[in-house]
Amino acid sequence: GNGKASAALLAREGATVFAADINKDAVMETKRLIEEEGGTCQAHVGDVSKSETVAEMVSACTSAFGRIDILHNNVGGSAPGGPVEMPEDVWDRQMDHNLKHVYLVCKAVLPIMETQGKGAIVNMSSVAALSYTGAHHIAYDATKAAIIRFSQSVAIQYADKGVRCNTVIPGQMHTPLVEFRLAGDRAGGDVERIIRERNERVPMGHMGDAWDVAYAVLYLASDEAKYVTGTEILVDGGLTLKSN
């Protein structure tokens, strides 16, 4: 998905990668891809919505590599339902899954970047933060909108400390999530239907892919974006320019 592509692209451009995922198989696959291309990647397994896991992850990264120059927060997922239909425990899990981890990881990494006098944070939002995308998922919408404002707040607080913070806002992307979850959740298992419907929503006529997202992440993380902070890059094929 988006995280794997971003990690691989950053490695291709010379970054040493510390990859973290709750799924061991997924993070080891990312590590394998990077190392097969001659890059360096250390894998870490854990739930970044837990403060103790974040502390372990950040400690392991700094022990291995001595510093943290780029932080890419790419955890997220949606649960269906509006405020009436969504159970309270699902709402709480969505807050932790989509938003709390951004707070926890930034809380742990920002002091390191401030000490270094340099750092770039790239957080992931969604077009669901900006407009209706064809599905009702109130907690996802709310958390993804909050990430944009969170990033802006960090950007202004740390602007004079050499730390930048920006957000990528992906639209309808064709990642494995489409076939493996969305088709079942929203199209009765009909993969062709979900792909067609998502393609038809986009003014360009087709979904983007994980590499489209990765190149936006790469730019915001790079020195070429040294004067860019507190902003967002929309990667949506024009989706948010039309009404749904």
Image: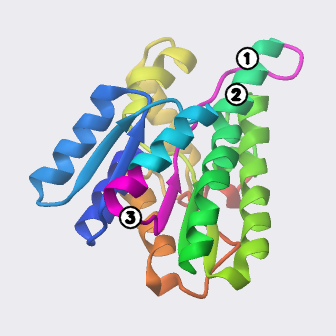
Q: Which residues are magenta?
A: 61-86
Which secondary structure dominates the residues rendered in magenta? loop
Q: Closer to the observer: label 3 or label 1? A: 3
The residues bearing labels 2 and 1 have C-alpha atoms spaced at a distance of 6 Å
Q: Is residue 33 above or below residue 95?
A: below
Give whichever of 109, 209 is nearer the camera: 109
The structure residue drawn at horizontal position 33% and vertical position 64%, both measured from the top left corner, is: 10
Which mark is drawn over residue 66? 3
Query: Could you say whether the residue bearing mark 2 is in a helix, strand or loop?
Result: helix
Number of residues whose C-alpha sits closer than 10 Å to that of mark 3, classed few (under 14), some (14–19) or many (20 or more): few
Q: Which residue does the numbered mark 1 point to in the structure image?
A: 90
The structure residue drawn at horizontal position 67% and vertical position 53%, both measured from the top left corner, is: 107
Q: Which residue does the numbered mark 2 point to in the structure image?
A: 94
Image side of residue 13 versus residue 239, left or right:
left
Number of residues whose C-alpha sits closer than 10 Å to that of mark 1, classed few (under 14), some (14–19) or many (20 or more): some
Question: Residue 111: percent from the left, percent from the top?
Answer: 63, 64
User: Which amino acid is tagged 1?
Assistant: Val
Label whose residue precedes the other's in the sequence (3 or 1): 3
